[in-house]
Each structure stands twice: as structure tokens, then as C-alpha cells.
Amino acid sequence: MIFPEYRPRRLRRNESFRALIRETHLSAAQLIYPLFVMPGKGKKEQISSMPGVFRITVDQLGKEARECLDLGVNSVILFGLPAKKDPMGSGAHAKDGIIQQAIKELKNKAPELLVFTDVCLCEYTSHGHCGILINEQVDNDSTLEVLASTALSHARAGADMVAPSDMMDGRVGEIRAILDDNNFQHVPIMSYAVKYASAFYGPFRDAADCAPQHGDRRGYQMDPANAVEALREATLDVEEGADILMVKPAVAYLDIIHRLRAEFDLPIAAYHVSGEYAMIKAAGANGWIDEERVMQETLLSIKRAGADIILTYFAKDMARLLRK
């Protein structure tokens, strides 16, 4: 029998058929929604550089939590704006600090919600850097104790997971040790293992009021030119006890996400950061792109690169789209 020449066919069919053979899937349960918490009562302030994102007071968190859960977004990460800042970032680990209050409120109003907390000092220091300054330079070792105390205070308040984002050397091990010593062995660590000194963070610094007052953060965040270094940084965090590895930013570093996915068997998270979000919102508002489709395509690219978890300001919007 003579067979006809085989010609590969592109599987272009209706939406049901496309869904059947789709290789990459997004789920609302894999998204983490960032929340900015500020002092006061009954307030919800639009962040001008991040349309659709707000600063809210602690008493508004219950409503926000319910909206997330109703959409299938089961996880949030908290960022705090303290009433006062000082050079040592003491508000970060205060027993009644803004994040400590926020954790308790969320666990009281929505106990099923997973509450992640950012562990860093930039939101709490008067100088805006992520660590303690000595002679105008961030001192790695003196910062570790403060970061560990901050993580412990979050665990005591009821956080489900802590996420150190400072990029100090040794902070994962320090945090793991203090949590274990205080019977919080069950609280995992999502490490910002690979955090680049990126220009995409501008809107976040506006939202959290944490831009450095002098200098920049290139001394302790990664050079955007480096890829092999990402593997070294992630390896160190794994050895120190990290449970999830995060890459930040996401879209400009899809290759790094892919490298980590190939190298490690831990869950990989990616932070679709404020600048990446703001660009889509701005272009969509001007009619230059289809915002909804670009949002979906962007988040799919992050997932396709190998991320298991995506932190994104689009979490609620994407969840609504998935419901369609």
C-alpha cells in the first residue's frame, strides 16, 4: 500500500478543541494578590501610578479578602505603610505594627485565606533602604537580626508564610533558625531568591513610599546582566531552608524563571511587578493594546516559562476572566 505524503496539520479548531490540547493553564488558585495596608480607618486610596490598585486601612481588609476568595484567589501578600519611620526600621517588627494588625484582621475575618508577608525594611526605614545603614552603606550582618525578628513577629501574628525580599546574604537561614527555635517550624519561607536591581519597581516605590533617599539598591540586588549568578543565589537559599524560590521581576526575566525550573524541584514563584503591570494598564487606557488579552498573554508567558505561582496586581482581573 502506498501512503500519501504526510503533511503535519495545524490544529486550528473551535475554542473547545483548542482548550482540549492547550499546554499551559492558568488558575486563580495559583495567583497571589498584593495588598498595601496603611494606617487609619475607613480609607481606600487609589495609587496614581497603578490604576486599579489601592492602599487600604486594616478595617477594609475583610471586604478585600472576601472578594479575593469569591473569585478563587486564595492567597494575598501584605506590604505595610507604617505611621512612623526611623533609621532602624523598628516598625517592621513592632508587636502592634501595621502588618501585624493586618495579619490578625485577615485571619479573624477570613481564616481560609493564605496570608503571605513581605519581610523587608525598605517600607519602614526613613532612608528607604532594605537594611541597616552603617557609614551610609547597608550592613548585611546587622540587618539579619532585624529581618529575623520581623519574620518571627509575622509568624506570631498568624502569617501562613513569610517572604524575605531584602536580598541580604544569609537571611533565609537566619529566619529559618528563629522560626524553628520558637516552634514555628510549620511556617514556610518563600524567598525572593533572585531579585534584580530593576527599573520596573518605580510604581511600587510610589505605592509603598519606599524609594531610597540616597543612592540605590544595586549593591545588594542583582545585576540585570547576570544569569549564572541567579543559580548561585537560589542554591544558597535552598541550602538555608527556602521552601519556594521567587524570581523578580517576571516578564523581563523569563529565561531566569526557566533556568530555575530546570535546576530545582522546589516550587518556583514569579513576581509580575508594578512597572510591568503599569505599562499594560497605560497602554490599554490609551487604546494601544487590548488590555485583557495582553494581561492573559503576559501571565501565560510567565507560567509557560516555568512558574508555579504568580504574584500579580492582575490577580483579581485574571480570575474574573477565567470565570468566563
Image (spheres, rainbow, N blue to C red):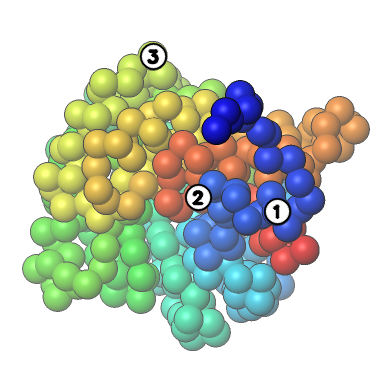
Mark toward the start of the polypeptide (3 vs 1): 1
**CB-based contact (under 8 Å), mark 1 and mark 2:** no
- Name the quadrant of the C terminus: bottom right
Q: Residues within 10 Å of mark 3 (few under 14, many from 20)?
A: few
What residue is disc 3 on? 225
Toward which corner of the image does residue 263 lie, by quadrant?
Answer: top left
* Identity, as a three-letter code, of the amino acid under mark 3: Ala
Position of 283 compared to 100: left or right? right
What residue is disc 2 on? 310
Tally of numbered discs: 3
Q: Residues within 10 Å of mark 2 (few under 14, many from 20)?
A: many
What residue is disc 1 on? 17
The percent coordinates of residue 310 (x first, y second) are: 50, 50
The percent coordinates of residue 193 (x first, y second) are: 30, 39
Task: Decide which of 318, 156 is in the foreground and name it.
Answer: 318
Compared to 268, does 223 lie above or below? Answer: above
Mark toward the start of the polypeptide (1 vs 2): 1
Q: Give the CA distance from mark 3 to mark 1.
A: 41 Å
Look at the numbered disc 2 and give the secondary structure of its residue: strand
* Identity, as a three-letter code, of the amino acid under mark 1: Phe
- Name the quadrant of the N terminus: top right
Q: Give the CA distance from mark 1 to mark 2.
A: 27 Å
**CB-based contact (under 8 Å), mark 3 and mark 1:** no
The percent coordinates of residue 168 (x first, y second) are: 24, 37
Q: Residues within 10 Å of mark 1 (few under 14, many from 20)?
A: few
Toward which corner of the image does residue 286 lie, by quadrant?
Answer: top right
> Which of the labelled discs sits on residue 167, or is there none?
none
